[in-house]
Image: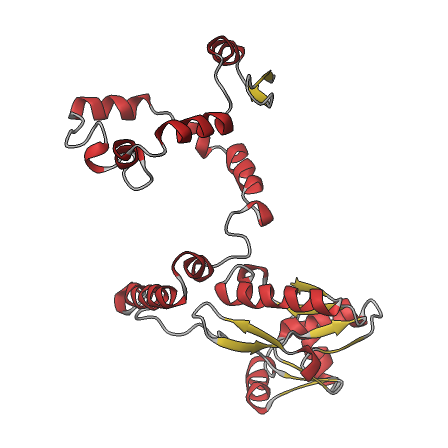
Amino acid sequence: MEYKRNCPKCGKVLYYTSKYNRNALEKKGTLCMSCSSVIKNKKHGNNKKFIERYGTKGNNTGKDNAFYGKHHTEETKEKILKDRDYSYAKTKDFRKKQSINNSGIKNPMYGKTYYDIWISKYGKIEADKRQKEKIRKNSIASSGKNNPMYGKSTPQGSGNGWSGWYKGWFFRSLRELSYMIKEIEGKNKKWRTAETKDLKIKYVDYKGDERTYVADFLVEEKELIEVKPTKLKKSLTVRAKAKAARKFCKEKGLIYKIKDVKILLEKEIKELHDKKIIKFTDRYEEKYNEKYNNKQL
């Protein structure tokens, strides 16, 4: 239940979750934050001691903090830990609620990168320095024994795009091929490849370098489609491309979409290959023969 009152000075409606807070502040005649700020600025605006102590740079930090140089006793620490109950944070309902409240456009980092924020706060030169240092630290953190693949062989098929041709169209992965067959041909949609000069998109990657990006399909002359696994949608590279693509599409009157699709079954791929509807590049033709020649599907 909400409780409300009006600011005595400007009449702004103020809301409270407790009637006791509302009644106490109403009795004191407390003003809203805006009106209070105006009065404090008028009163202390030219007071050097007030600015030194309560200005944005001092403000309860270092020696200005009442607890400066002090420490909690072990007994107090144990009492604090005992009194804290965070069990609610481990429940599925709480996690689900937090996920909903911080997903998509509700997330303060939606559509942003740390590099974007650094540029706005410190400028490009400082942002480049911070980005370079971040890459260096990440490299150290994932090198040698810190790398989860250290001492392990490369998984079979990893990094393979399984590229080839389907009815004269060049596909770069089985996911693209699957999207073409299931979502475009399966629903009788008109399309053309997005790898054309008029659909090239300029973007800045997470390192700050200028690059060119092309999506996969232009469907019905209105939807620019990028086929990508769901798990990669939040990667820095994909987000940087998507940000530039959405701006590009808005200017061109198009809609940008990142789509995932269930990949064709091995049986379906073999059938298409046997009928010569698809043909892989030389590299993947060899892999295909190794994989399927002695395999019963």
Taking 44 as reference, is 216 above or below it?
below
- In the image: residue 251, left or right of residue 21: right
Q: Quadrant of residue 49?
A: top left
Residue 20 shows in this picture: yes
Q: Quadrant of residue 79?
A: top left
Q: Residue at x 51, y 37 (%)?
A: 95
Residue 243 in the image, given as x and y percentages of width and height: 59, 63
Q: Residue at x 71, y 74 (%)?
A: 217
Q: Residue at x 30, y 35 (%)?
A: 51
Give the camera-side residue of 130 and 237.
130
Residue 259 in the image, given as x and y percentages of width and height: 66, 63
Residue 71 in the image, given as x and y percentages of width and height: 16, 29
Taking 244 as reference, is 49 above or below it?
above
- In the image: residue 192, left or right of residue 69: right
Give the camera-side residue of 61 and 157.
61
- In the image: residue 119, left or right of residue 14: left
Quarter of the image for the C terminus: give it. Answer: bottom right
